[in-house]
Amino acid sequence: KTSQLNTDDVVLEVGPGPGALTLELARVCRQVIAGEKDKALSALLEEKLAQNNVGNVEIVIDDILQFLNSKSCKLKAINYQVVANIPYYLTSALIRKLLELPRPPENIFLTIQKEVAQRICATNKKESLLSLSVKFYADPKIHFYISRGSFLPAPKVDSAFIEITPKKSHSPIAPERFFAVLKAGFSSPRKKLISNLSINLLNIDKTTLSLIFQKLNISESIRPEKLSLQQWLSLSQCLEVQ
């Protein structure tokens, strides 16, 4: 319901398993592309779809990251959305891959580990390498939390249902430059940002950094987690990265 899907939508579901969510998606969407690398689970899903006379689901038996990279991936030519209860270990890699695609999804709805969702949205007002990496490309939002007891078998952690909406217009800052500065700045998160940058950006000295910080009204005592996305963008624009 939160994802507000309709009969015009094509949905990529990652890790459908036995198909509980797949059947619900198929009822409200034009087409579901279900990516499941486990052949045994794919067979169970195919059987369930046949039993329920569902004909608008295409099962892709492949690792999702490889599928998105493949030349035959039909998502490269259509508008689509992503809805999935993904394995927690896959969270960061999948989100990054989806957001960096030449044609990213219109929306991404994921059930992920609660703490990871909170890090992505920086609910504690502290940015991270993960949160800023997502926010460079998209706007994240937590809709609600799900207790571990809602799943069978119950996982060891609570979950969150998160929406990630890719931005329609891209930043004028090249991703390569932004992420080079970001990674340098977070190389030692507990140290001051200016120290991290002076150590890791070999072509710029601390005196020059001080002048740039003054120009951008950034305190030289600030730590990387306290900078907003806009400040990171401004900083990246002022720095030449080798």
Image (tube, rainbow, N blue to C red):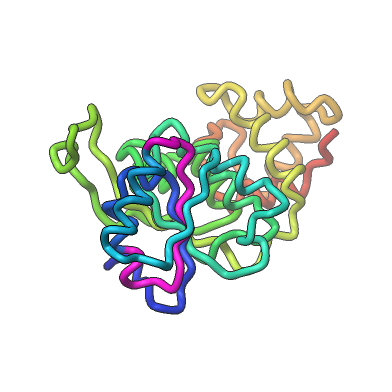
Q: Residue at x 17, y 37 (%)?
A: 152
Q: Residue at x 77, y 28 (%)?
A: 201
- Single out the residue that lies furthest toward the left: 149
Q: Residue at x 64, y 55 (%)?
A: 73
Task: Please provide percent x and percent y for residue 168.
Answer: 61, 69
User: Is residue 170 located in the magenta-colored stretch of the structure?
Assistant: no
Left or right placement of residue 36 versus residue 196 in this view: left
Task: Please provide percent x and percent y for residue 7.
Answer: 40, 78
Residue 87 higher or lower than 18, as above or below: above
Left or right placement of residue 238 versus residue 118 in this view: right
Identify the magenta region. Answer: 25-40
> Toward which corner of the image does residue 200 lie, by quadrant?
top right
In this rendered view, identify the residue nearer to me: 95 or 173. Answer: 95
In this rendered view, identify the residue nearer to me: 1 or 242. Answer: 1
Left or right placement of residue 142 versus residue 65 in this view: left
Task: Please provide percent x and percent y for residue 145.
Answer: 23, 48
Task: Please provide percent x and percent y for residue 164.
Answer: 46, 56
In this rendered view, identify the residue nearer to me: 177 or 212. Answer: 177
Specify the quadrant that holds the C terminus: top right
Specify the quadrant that holds the N terminus: bottom left
User: Is residue 26 located in the magenta-colored stretch of the structure?
Assistant: yes
Residue 172 higher or lower than 5, as above or below: above
